[in-house]
Image (spheres, rainbow, N blue to C red):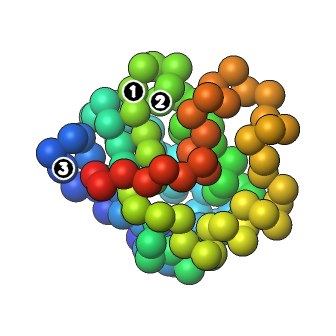
């Protein structure tokens, strides 16, 4: 079961996700991201306590990234990507070079990492 929590930070909002991000949670993830989009100009996502992730939720996060960028808002990953996320990204062959998005210049998975 995934648990989502959004808190205020100095720069905007931090969304902490705990548990598995699988297809059963894709709609809830989308809803929480849309709520955050309407309430902040900068969202940092803390994925450190996620235990699993699948393609459906990776796609929701990629779509959120495009939506934030298009609206000239900022979205990033807090801290470093977990091994769980790195493996999921590799397993589904997400590759910045093969992405044809016009927003490819700011790929959520490039992972610079922010401090919130």
In the rendered structure, which disc, 2 or 3, sits on the residue that comes first in sequence?
3
Q: Nearer the viewer, residue 31 or 115?
A: 115
In the rendered structure, which disc, 1 or 2, sits on the residue that comes first in sequence?
2
**Secondary structure under badge 1?**
loop
Q: CA distance from mark 1 to mark 2?
A: 5 Å
Q: Position of residue 9 (x, y in %)?
A: 18, 49
Q: Position of residue 65 (x, y in %)?
A: 54, 37
Q: CA distance from mark 2 to mark 3?
A: 18 Å
Q: CA distance from mark 3 to mark 1?
A: 15 Å
Q: Residues within 10 Å of mark 2 (few under 14, many from 20)?
A: many
> Residue 97 sits in which quadrant?
top right
**Circle 1 is placed at which residue position?**
73
Q: Is residue 30 left or right of residue 12?
A: right
Q: Which mark is residue 43?
A: none
Task: Kindly give the residue lying farthest to the left in the view shown.
Answer: 10
**Circle 2 is placed at which residue position?**
68
In the rendered structure, which disc, 3 or 1, sits on the residue that comes first in sequence?
3
**Secondary structure under badge 3?**
loop
Q: Position of residue 25 (x, y in %)?
A: 58, 63
Q: Is residue 100 left or right of residue 18?
A: right
Q: Nearer the viewer, residue 23 or 9?
A: 9
Q: Are marks 1 and 2 in contact (CB under 8 Å)?
A: yes
> Residue 115 sits in which quadrant?
bottom left
Q: Is residue 110 left or right of residue 80?
A: right
**Circle 3 is placed at which residue position?**
9
Q: Are marks 3 and 1 in contact (CB under 8 Å)?
A: no
Q: Nearer the viewer, residue 87 or 21?
A: 87
């Amino acid at each position: 079961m995934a648990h989502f929590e959004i808190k205020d930070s100095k720069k905007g909002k931090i969304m902490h996700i705990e548990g598995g991000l699988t297809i059963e949670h894709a709609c809830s993830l989308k809803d929480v991201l849309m709520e955050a989009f309407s309430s902040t100009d900068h969202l940092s996502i803390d994925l450190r306590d996620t235990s699993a992730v699948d393609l459906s939720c990776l796609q929701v996060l990629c779509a959120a990234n495009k939506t934030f960028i298009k609206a000239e808002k900022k979205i990033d990953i807090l801290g470093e990507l977990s091994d769980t996320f790195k493996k999921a990204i590799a397993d589904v062959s997400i590759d910045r070079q093969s992405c044809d998005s016009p927003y490819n210049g700011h790929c959520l998975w490039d992972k610079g990492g922010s401090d919130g």
